[in-house]
Amino acid sequence: MSNKMWGGRFTERPDAIMEEINVSIDVDRHLYAQDIAASKAHAAMLAAQGIITASDAKNIGKGLDTILSEIGEGAFDFKRALEDIHMNVESRLSELIGPAAGRLHTARSRNDQVATDFRLYVRDTIDQTDAALAAFQHALAARALEHAATVMPGFTHLQTAQPVTFGHHLLAYVEMAARDRGRFADARKRLNESPLGAAALAGTSFPIDRAATAKALGFDRPMANSLDAVSDRDFVLETLSAASIAAVHMSRFAEEIVIWTSPLVGLVRLSDKFTTGSSIMPQKRNPDAAELVRAKTGRVIGALNGLLIVMKGLPLAYQKDMQEDKQGAMEAFSALSLAIRAMTGMVLDLVPDEARMKAAAGEGYATATDLADWLVRTLKMPFRDAHHVTGRIVALASKQDVALHELTLKAMQEVEPRITGDALRVLSVEASVKSRTSYGGTAPKNVFSQAKAWLKRLEKERKLG
Ligand code: ARG
């Protein structure tokens, strides 16, 4: 038998391989809630416009509610022969309510249907991702407040550069997550137009009300061009771009956790909750969660690349290629969600080794810039000269194998006779971070007020949301 949903002109069954390549139910079944919501909105609009009767619309709505709970309870029999979620739902609807089910598909096509469903799905994903990022920010800001004055080495080129505070370092990720949230919010704004009613590609001759269905589904307005409505997948690409950048941020942080927890570095410790052991080396505490976050980024970027390649060169309007838009995107969104949640867990779990951090902050002559700045400030030396003088003092300390603050004043004065005991005070790591009070700088006082401000903002947002 040919396909009962579209097989009118077909006399033969599809080849088994045809069915296998065509079927999408294993992926698009995840759109069931959105598919049913869109169908309900469509049926109600058809009745309001006098295109179907109110009693048919009522039965359709009731039947769709039944299907929604059947699927929710795992009691729905998804049939591969029915290809996709749209036809599975419609076929079940006709079992439940009879011929009226066949009126639901008036003035629409699977092309506008799938575009609508997936927009709704991506919109839900954006909202969930935003909430996860907000929780990540909250965890970071809380730990930053706790560690506003905890000194750690700041790095450039992964070489000890200048002392910073651990709180300041954590707040950097709060800022990154804020931009990620902004990108998702932007994508959401552009995404939030309804394709429903574009039908197959050209619109319809029925007197539909696209503004009504758009409104019922929480869209801002209907999409203005029916060809665009069924063939646009920018909304997925844009969301995957935002997801890729967010995943890159997660991977950078994950990499830092891997580095910090290495026994060679030892700045941070994760508890048993976020580490695993080795089956052969009893001493190991592996940061697997962080490593997996680092790796999941590959999936997200892969999905973006994959879909860009699917869409590249596709002529208007709908092409079946576009059925391949969902699987990678869905996997990418869930990988990102898991990565954000795992990072949030690690942020709350990690314990910095404050003594080790402080000692490491002082290694590698990290306060050399503070000495140069002292020479500029106190002796009015041009910075370039101060840099040179400090370089010679660092070389001296290195030769004697001591830290900068361990050099005697006399030794320093051999390089620059005008240096006084006052200069020694700027060489401690605490004095160094404390002096960095410029806007956005690492001074504990700055970090404290930034962390407080973030917590306040996030808590206010939580109450409103
Ligand atoms: N399963 C299809 C997809 O995901 C639904 C749209 C099918 N449209 C069609 N004309 N065959 O793209």
Image (cartoon, helix red, strand yellow):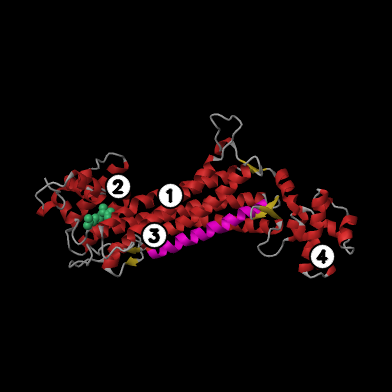
Between the C-alphas of marks 2 and 4, the distance is 69 Å
Between 52 and 421, the residue placed more toward the observer is 421
Residue identifier under label 4: 375
The structure residue drawn at horizontal position 79% and vertical position 51%, both measured from the top left corner, is 398
Verify CB contact (< 8 Å) between mark 4 and mark 1. Answer: no
Between 391 and 2, the residue placed more toward the observer is 391
Between the C-alphas of marks 3 and 1, the distance is 14 Å
Q: Which mark is residue 237?
A: 3
Of the image marks 3 and 4, the number of the one nearer the N terminus: 3
The structure residue drawn at horizontal position 25% and vertical position 63%, both measured from the top left corner, is 197
Instruction: Look at label 3 and name its amino acid.
Output: Leu
Q: Magenta part mainly helix, strand or loop?
A: helix
Of the image marks 2 and 4, the number of the one nearer the N terminus: 2
Between the C-alphas of marks 3 and 4, the distance is 53 Å
- Residue 185 belongs to magenta span: yes
Between the C-alphas of marks 3 and 2, the distance is 21 Å
Instruction: Look at label 4 and name its amino acid.
Output: Leu
- x, y (%) of residue 264? 66, 41
Instruction: Look at label 1 and name its amino acid.
Output: Arg
Q: Quadrant of ligand 1?
A: bottom left
Range of the magenta residues?
A: 165-190
Mark toward the viewer: 3 or 2: 3
Residue identifier under label 1: 299
Mark toward the viewer: 3 or 4: 4
Q: Which mark is residue 29?
A: 2
Question: In this rendering, is residue 361 above or below 210?
Answer: above
